[in-house]
Every structure is written in C-alpha cells, then in structure tokens.
Image (tube, rainbow, N blue to C red):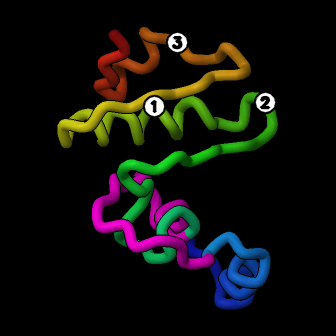
Amino acid sequence: MGLTEAQLEQLETAGLLRKGPKVRQFVDSGTYASNRVLSGNYVDGFPIRSISEIMGESSSGKTAFLSAAMGAAQAQGYYVIMCDNESSFQPDFAKIFNVNYD
C-alpha cells in the first residue's frame, strides 16, 4: 500500500519532500514510502553524511525502524550514531538487525 498522489502533494506542500543539497549516497530505509519522504524518490532512503531526525509517539516503532537502517548502513561500511532520548535502544534487539553497537 503506497501513498496516493494527494498524500504526496500534501507532503510536498509541507516541505517534507523539498530538494536540498545534492546527496549522492543513500541507505535504503526498508520501505518505499519512507524512502520517498527521506530522499524524494522510492529507491533511496537516508542520505549519507547527513543528520536525520525521526519523531513519533512513544512505542511507535522509531527504534526498530532506525535499528534496521543502522544495520543496513553498517553492512555497507558506514559508521552510524543514534541519539536515543527515550532510552529505548536495546542491544539484544539491535542484534536482530545486525547492528554493531560497540
């Protein structure tokens, strides 16, 4: 289930899909909709060498979402940093996504 054209238009109007500086490398977020919001297209995801902020309600899956992205980035040889304001990061859970947290 993807986003409708009307939903994409609302995101563009809100500035969420605005093009910024040219980024050439990305790490897939794992979902087409998230990739679209993060990078402006369905293939790319989190921009490399950039700061991305994920916000949402408590227990909405932010840490799982980021753990998957961190594991994907580390698999490509990148270093990642996560600032966990809710203290919800659990190393044992992150191992599922192949996150090296040392």
Instruction: Look at 47% across and 64% down and name the residue there.
Output: 35
Whether tag 1 and tag 3 are in contact, CB under 8 A, the answer is: no
Residue 61: x percent and y percent? 63, 36
Of labels 3 and 2, earlier in sequence is 2
Report the span colored magenta: 18-36
Query: How many labels, in total?
Result: 3
Instruction: Please rate how many residues cluster around mark 3, counting C-alpha atoms within 10 Å: few if below 14, some from 14 to 19, many from 20.
Output: few
Q: Does the magenta stretch include residue 20?
A: yes
Q: Which amino acid does label 1 sit on?
A: Ser
Q: In this view, does 20 lie to the left or right of 11?
A: left
Instruction: Say whether residue 1 is left or right of residue 46.
Output: right
Please indicate whether residue 50 sits to the left or right of residue 24 in the image. Answer: right
Sequence-earlier tag: 1 or 3: 1
What residue is disc 2 on? 58
Q: Say if 5 sits above or below 96 in the image.
A: below
Q: Quadrant of the C terminus?
A: top left
Q: How far apart are marks 3 and 2 (CA)?
A: 15 Å
Q: Which of marks 1 and 2 is nearer the N terminus?
A: 2
Identified at 42% across, 60% down, the residue is 45
Label 1 secondary element: helix
Name the disc covering residue 90, or none.
3
Where residue 41 appears, x then y in whole percent?
A: 45, 76
Secondary structure of the residue carrying numbered label 3: loop
Please tell me which residue lies in front, 3 or 85: 85
Predominant SS along the magenta part: loop
Query: Image quadrant of residue 92?
Result: top left
Label 1 Cα neighbours within 10 Å, binned few <14 / some 14-19 / many ≥20: many
Q: Residue beneath label 1, please?
A: 67
